[in-house]
Image (cartoon, rainbow, N blue to C red):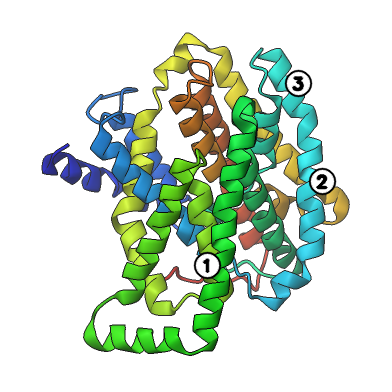
Amino acid sequence: MSFATLAVISLAALLGPLLALPRLWHLPVVLGELVAGVLLGPTAIGYLNARNPTFSFLADIGFALIMFVAGARVPVRDTALRAGLRTGTLRAVAVGVLALVPAFALARVFHTGHTALYTVLMASSSAALILPVVGSLGLGGGAVLQMLPQVAVADTACIVALPLVIDPRHAARAALGALAVIGCAGVAFVALSRLERGGYRRRLHHLSEERQFALELRISLVVLFSFAALAVRTHVSIMLAGFSLGLVASAVGEPRRLAKQLFALTEGFFGPLFFLWLGASLDLRALGQRPSFVALGVLLGLGAVAVHAAMRATGQPVGIGVLASAQLGVPVAAATLGTQLHLLEPGEAAALMLGALVTIAAATVASSLTARNSPATTAQPSPT
């Protein structure tokens, strides 16, 4: 990998903001980055090689940071969010139960035997996608406040469950690894809470700001990379390491200055690089060899949308339910882990990502219609 390649990656990453620029489209930035990766990867031009060790390692850093920022965006301390926790949790569980039916049917029809994996995929929600959409469109009200804990619960539960269902033979090892990461997150929460109550974090913040040391960012990266190292050592997805630490930061109270620094580091370079790597790692030509997997991907996406929209029976507006179906982190991790461990059929990883794109498209349309039908809605800018 060279500086010329990094320059091409940085240039290609601009496709994300360009596609997201028209406000009427309400397209997530990551969509353009994924498309750019697909075009530069083996599917089209073949310029980017996702197997390059340096490229892969930089992408892992980006994935850890993306999930950390996603976890930190979950408003754990919001009293209104906690008030809707019971309803949101029940809906997340109901979606998971409903997902069993289409997951079983798809696994049988396409002869993959991945009922558990498809269930987790269809039951998942992506806080990394949904929270920015809610913020940028200014969506509010009781239905949204009940959806946010639903998304947080589903995202967390599916992140923990994924390594258990994708490789059942090593489920015990994955469970122990997940417990180790979650246990470390609990220790970090206790330690940071005590430092916060003792005023040490505030002193560190003032010192860092006064002397321009960026100490909070440096320390956060030390802890994040330590969690990621533990996840890799225990054969757990980096996604769990980043997301759990992000939840800890949200629960303790992430300083605004640190949030801006992490946002710049992630959205400015490592995040786009990861999504370009992900697009480049997907050889969509493999779908041509297994055309039936195109149908699998579409049906996985439609199944996820359907089981989330079914929460209309519990009083949730259809648009909000469809928005909650947007998924990204779990399919990404499933495609990555499944490819690395050779657990997926040729073309199946691309099918999983195609399913995720279907949910993103449906959620984009649903959120746009919801925003247009809510007169009180006002757009809120993302942090910069």
Q: Residues within 10 Å of mark 2 (few under 14, many from 20)?
A: some
In the picture, measured across the screen, residue 213 lies left or right of residue 225, that is left
State whether residue 30 is above or below residue 252.
Answer: above
The residue sitting at 34% across, 40% down in the picture is 276
Q: CA distance from mark 1 to mark 3?
A: 42 Å
The residue closer to the viewer here, 204 or 54, is 204
Q: Secondary structure at mark 2?
A: helix
Query: N-terminal of the two: label 1 or label 3?
Result: 3
In the picture, measured across the screen, residue 297 lies left or right of residue 67, that is right
The residue sitting at 70% across, 33% down in the picture is 119
Residue 108, percent from left and from top = 73, 15
Q: Secondary structure at mark 3?
A: helix
What amino acid is found at the position of numbered circle 3 in the picture?
A: Ala
The residue closer to the viewer here, 152 or 373, is 152
Numbered circle sitting on residue 188: 1
What amino acid is found at the position of numbered circle 1 in the picture?
A: Ala
Numbered circle sitting on residue 105: 3
Residue 60, percent from left and from top = 37, 44
What residue is pinned by disc 2? 94
In the picture, measured across the screen, residue 357 lies left or right of residue 308, that is left
The residue closer to the viewer here, 232 or 209, is 232
Numbered circle sitting on residue 334: none
What amino acid is found at the position of numbered circle 2 in the picture?
A: Ala
State whether residue 267 is above or below residue 161.
Answer: below
Q: Quadrant of the C terminus?
A: bottom left
